[in-house]
Image (cartoon, helix red, strand yellow):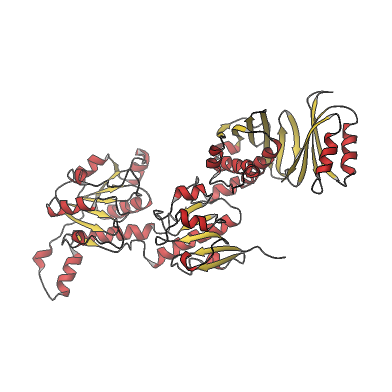
Amino acid sequence: MSVTVSYVLVADSMSTEGLRPLLDDPRIEVVQKKPSELDSLEDFVALVVRSATQVDEALLLRMPNLKIVARAGVGVDNIDLDAATKHGVIVINAPDGNTISTAEHTFAMMMALSRNIPQAYASVKAKEWNRKAFQGMELRGKTLGIIGFGRIGSELSKRAAAFQMSVVVYDPFLTPERAKKAGVTLVDLEDLLNQADVITVHTPLTKETKGLLNEETLKKTKRGVLILNIARGGIIDESALQKAIEDGHVGGAALDVFVNEPTDNFDLISLKQVIATPHIAASTHEAQESVASQVSYEIAQVLNGAPATHSINLPAISEELYEQIKPYYDLTKVMGYFASQCVKTPVQHIDVSFGGDIATEETSVLTRSFMSGFLSPRVDAGVNEVNAGIIAKERGISYSEAHSSESYGYANIIQANIKGTAGEFLVRGTYIDAFGPRIIRINEFNVDLFPSGHLIYIRHTDQPGVIGEMGQALGKHGVNIATMQVGRKEEGGDAIMMLSVDKEIPQEAIEQLTSVPAILAADVIEL
């Protein structure tokens, strides 16, 4: 039996050991080249980059089969997230891999800055011995101001506590409970600027954080404050920082990142109060292997059907949660695909609701999975959980998600109510450990359907002999019925049949079915 090979392009230099989850997978072929070195990129389904490769619209157009882009690191400034989402490409990163390396580098820079270590080193190397020129500042008893209290900020606060520093934090998303648990004081930005002896920034670069420390905000800091940026170039206005240092208000700065890299701002870094490193906070052997290993493992998982756990443009879920919801992830996808083939008319809105135990979990990825399945038969572009929302909006389809304690006697229930120009269509499903995914209701009819293979959905009037005529019609075309579900409102009223058959159904068989007077409609559903 042949194995389908997935091609992965590693565009930037990467740790071989970190790539081991991909290199050791027989279903994956790894190519380590720059995109510019290849004539065609059409075969690649995954792309791994660091900060050097720009993943923009032009590159995405060259990679029409791309499913996932992995940034071996934290920042995704070099990836056009809007374009990736539009093209249905998952973007993941490795948020944990370089946390310790970056936190340690930040603290090392703080120590070096407060004790003038680089300047003293250069003086000694120049055969000087000038002890009085390099008097420093103790960190004990000082206040460290951390802007952005994510993984790195949190690790930094632990190290500051060991040095007997007080820590104040500005982070709009940090709760007082979490701040108390971490042993830090939550303050607003102005209070942090007023109180801190050392300020370090650890936020992403966004519209809100660009130039966060500028001429106006730097004036609000203590005279002699030390400033660190080991996060992203642009969070600190470099011109304003230079002016504040030259004026004597800012005592010094330690910088690992710059607006332009390699930096050309020699007026700033040539100041004796400034120490700088060339964006190396994450450059340890351990970190480089860790980030490569983390994204490599996740790529392998995604290419084998699992949802992304560190997605930037999708709700992230843990591996533990994924194991819990995986059966429902598969169920929602097939329910959406099933419903779309049952509803042949335009749709305006879809309500997806969850009941029972599943309602207590993070279900947004399941709603996206349903929408992905629903849209797939309707559009000519590739649809997945990433771009399903955009494609639905482009086609005038809105959707919502709800949770309920109602489970209709089942442990878990997923239901979708689809509203369109021809009315409403309801499908309800569940997952039963011993039996797998089941569709248990179609509109007002209870059924017990295993959603797989070749199906025929028949609406008819409940009359004697209809089932026999149906069997004869299919038999004439060599279509064998494997299973049959029937349901009716009342004797002689509306009824349905859901058939599972052994092979694809020819159009002639469907035409013969619909020629039976009591059969109102018959639709082929392929799952």
Residue 522 image point, x, y percent:
78, 36
Looking at the rendering, which quadrant does residue 332 occupy?
top right
Residue closest to the eye, 151 or 480: 480
Q: Is residue 280 above or below residue 315?
A: below
Looking at the rendering, which quadrant does residue 25 occupy?
bottom right
Residue at the (50%, 66%) spot, across then down: 19
Horizontal side of 484 relative to 406 (left or right) equals right
Question: Which residue appears farthest toward the bottom when viewing the image?
Answer: 127
Horizontal side of 319 relative to 282 (left or right) equals right
Q: Is residue 64 above or below residue 517?
A: below
Residue 414 image point, x, y percent:
63, 36
Question: Which quarter of the rendering shows the N terminus?
Answer: bottom right
Horizontal side of 110 relative to 47 (left or right) equals left
Can the viewer see residue 317 in this picture?
no
Residue at the (67%, 64%) spot, across then down: 3
Residue 38 image point, x, y percent:
51, 67
Please tell me how many numbered marks the rendered image carries: 0
Looking at the rendering, which quadrant does residue 180 occupy?
top left
Can the viewer see residue 449 in this picture?
yes
Residue closest to the eye, 39 or 86: 39
Residue closest to the eye, 478 or 408: 478
Residue 172 image point, x, y percent:
34, 40
Q: Is residue 126 above or below residue 85?
A: below
